[in-house]
Amino acid sequence: MQVTGTEDVAAPIKHVFAELTAFDALERQAMRRGIDVRRQFRTAEPTIGDGWDATFRFRGKERNAKITLDACDAPNEVCFTGVSGGLETNTQVELVPLSPNRTRVNLVVKMNPKTLSARLLVQSFKLARSSINKRFKKRMTQFARDIENKVVKTA
């Protein structure tokens, strides 16, 4: 299954990339949502192959996920791989400059089930595709507005 989203942000590409790779802030945001995030790298910033271990509750069960940074081409692209049980995900975030102060964010999340239970989970996602796409779009829009608000405050 694949979920895609596109959002235009009224901010320069370098600023959007900096916000997208502000891993400290993203980790804090995940923790506020009840996700336990542990870094698996020694330096201040992750390099290719570094990542995070996350523990969260989903559908009443405690789940573990390992997220790895696969590619980081500043300021154009960031790619992650996640593994949770029998479900593998590939996330690609591509930034395209539309003008000096406008950037398009293209986000693609691919889910690849490896076990029967993961296949059942992805099948239930497919049945709820419409609501998942709406929530995905809403979250992308909110992220874009948050970035735009930070640009206004620093200007």
Image (tube, grey):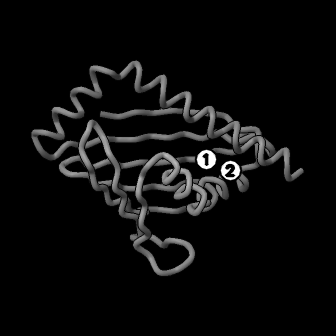
Q: Which mark is residue 95?
A: 1
Cβ atoms under marks 2 and 1 closer than 8 Å = yes
Q: Position of residue 20 (x, y in %)?
A: 60, 53
Write the residue at 76% across / 44% down.
11
Q: Secondary structure at mark 1?
A: strand
Q: Which mark is residue 125?
A: none
Sequence-first tag of 2 and 1: 2
Residue lying at the far left of the rendered structure: 116
Looking at the rendered structure, the kind of residue marked 2 is Val
Looking at the rendered structure, the kind of residue marked 1 is Leu
Q: Which mark is residue 16?
A: 2
Q: CA distance from mark 2 to mark 1?
A: 8 Å
Write the residue at 24% across / 26% down.
124
Q: Which quarter shows the N terminus?
A: top left
Q: Is residue 107 above or below residue 86?
A: above
Q: Position of residue 121 (x, y in %)?
A: 21, 34
Crowd band around label 1 with a 10 angstrom C-alpha radius: few (<14), some (14–19), many (20+): many
Q: Is residue 30 above or below residue 74?
A: above
Q: Position of residue 86 (x, y in %)?
A: 18, 49
Q: Position of residue 60 (x, y in %)?
A: 26, 39
Q: Secondary structure at mark 2?
A: helix
